Image (tube, grey):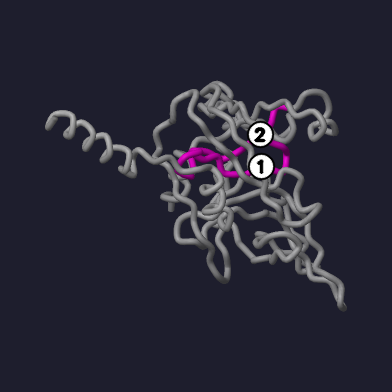
Amino acid sequence: MKAWFGILFCAAILLLSPFARTTELADVIDSLRPSIVGIGTVRPVRGNQKPAINFRGTGFVVGNGRQVITNYHVLPEKLDRANKESLAIFVGRGKTGNAMIVRVLREDRDHDLALLEIIDGSLPAMRLGDAALIREGSDIALTGFPIGMVLGLYPVTHKGIISAITPIVIPAISSRAITAAQMKRMRNPFEVYQLDATAYPGNSGSPVYKRDTGEVIGVINSVFVKGSKETVLEKPSGISYAIPIRYVHDLLSSQ
């Protein structure tokens, strides 16, 4: 009788343990939604008109709450300073979103990453996983703005798995822009996550995170497109790629 009581007691302790409980994805999304931001530019307009906004991709808040990670290719090549255009993040929900001005702190063109800083204010930061690659087959989710801000700020979540860890080379914008350093990288590509998850061009810079904890393990970088770019929304391939979080750690720690 005592033996059976001991077994039942241990089982009850295990079931009540926080390690035994799994967090619902819906709860994870609720907790991280305030950290997901749109990335783009904003330009004031004279009179009572709304500011001119140009959406370019997704980002997420890290570190001290003033730092934002996105893709390097999401950044504009240049700003129209003559018309007071500024780099900005878009926060909030629905059509009541607000713009917060940011500046570029650091860039990692080799791994297509950029670190931004919010000029005034802060937001809740996401938790970053450690630098080790997670296993193929692991459950993940990603949240971002796949079709931009057409209907307002409505972050969208897709779930999937890590389908492979594969080498990749970040391409130049055009063959004429290929440098000696890029040629060297082509001979020594780095490993990225291939995801069995749906993403779209607006997801560039979206965080990829563990489905049960919300810890960020990568950053969406590219989407495999079947056919033309115009058909990507209608016929998504379901194959996406993400830069491992180790390179975000490197960017945050670099001087």
Q: Against 125, is 229 above or below?
A: above
Above or below, comparing residue 162 to residue 42 in the picture: above
Q: Which amino acid does label 1 sit on?
A: Ser
Number of numbered discs on residues: 2
Picture layout, residue 215 above or below residue 242: below
Find out whether residue 151 is within the magenta segment: no
In the rendered structure, the answer to whether residue 109 lies left or right of residue 21 reads: right
Between 189 and 221, the one lying in front of the other is 221
Q: Which residue type does callout 2 highlight?
A: Ser
Quarter containing the N terminus: top left
Closer to us: 246 or 20: 20
Secondary element at tag 2: strand
Q: Residues within 10 Å of mark 2 (few under 14, many from 20)?
A: many
Residue occupied by mark 1 = 204
Find the distance from the CA under tag 2 to the CA under tag 1: 7 Å
Across and down, in percent, residue 214 comes to 48, 45
Instruction: Give the labeled residue for mark 2.
Output: 222
In the rendered structure, find residue 172 and report the number of the disc placed on it: none
Q: Give the range drawn in magenta.
A: 198-224
Left/right of residue 150 with respect to residue 185 in the rendered view: right
- The residue sitting at 74% across, 33% down in the picture is 174
Spot occupied by residue 46 in the image (x, y as percentages of width and height): 86, 75
Task: Identify the residue shown where x is 65% and y is 59%.
Answer: 89
Q: Label 1 near label 2: C-beta < 8 Å? A: yes
Residue 100 occupies which quadrant of the picture?
bottom right
Residue visible at 39% across and 33% down? 132
Q: What element carries label 1?
A: loop
Q: Please, is residue 108 above or below residue 189 in the view?
A: below
